[in-house]
Image (cartoon, grey):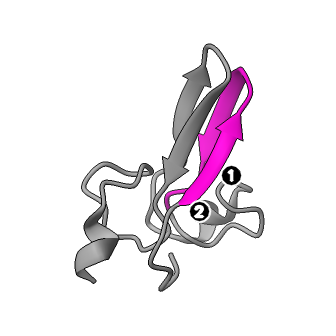
Amino acid sequence: MSNKKEPMVINEKPGRKLYCLCGKTKNPPYCDGSHETTDVDGPFEMNIESETEVKICTCGQTSNPPFCDGTHQNC
C-alpha cells in the first residue's frame, strides 16, 4: 500500500472484481497476480450487482480490507 491519505474512489460497473490486498499490483486497485511472490493468499473477490461507488483503502491500515474505513485520518 502507499502513504496516501485518501481512498481511491471508483464508480464500479456490475461484474466480478478482484481487488489487490498485497499492495504490489501494477494496476491498482485490481489484482494482477503479484501476490504470488508474497505471503498474501490472494485478492479480495467481489461480485458487483449494480453500478455503485466503492472506496478502496490506499493507506493499508483499514480494518475492512480492501475498503476504506477512515483510518487514514489518524495516520
Q: Residue at x 50, y 62 (%)?
A: 7
- Bin the neighbour count of mark 2 within 10 Å (Cα to Cα): few under 14, some 14-19, many 20 and up: some
SS majority, magenta: strand
- Bin the neighbour count of mark 1 within 10 Å (Cα to Cα): few under 14, some 14-19, many 20 and up: some
The one nearer the camera, 39 or 23, is 23
Q: Which one is closest to the eye, mark 1 or mark 2?
A: 1
Q: Residue at x 30, y 61 (%)?
A: 70
Q: Amino acid at mark 2?
A: His
Taking the magenta stretch, the answer to whether it contains residue 43 is: no
Question: Alpha carbon of mark 1 to alpha carbon of mark 2: how far?
Answer: 11 Å
Mark 2 — residue?
35
Q: Which mark is residue 57?
A: none
Sequence-first tag of 1 and 2: 1
Q: Residue at x 62, y 72 (%)?
A: 24
Q: Secondary structure at mark 2?
A: helix
Mark 1 — residue?
30
x and y percent of residue 11 in the render? 68, 39
The range drawn in magenta is 8-21
x and y percent of residue 6 in the render? 48, 70
x and y percent of residue 65 in the render? 38, 51
Q: Quadrant of residue 52?
A: top right
In this view, 44 is above or below 49: below
- Is residue 35 at all visible to an observer of this figure? yes
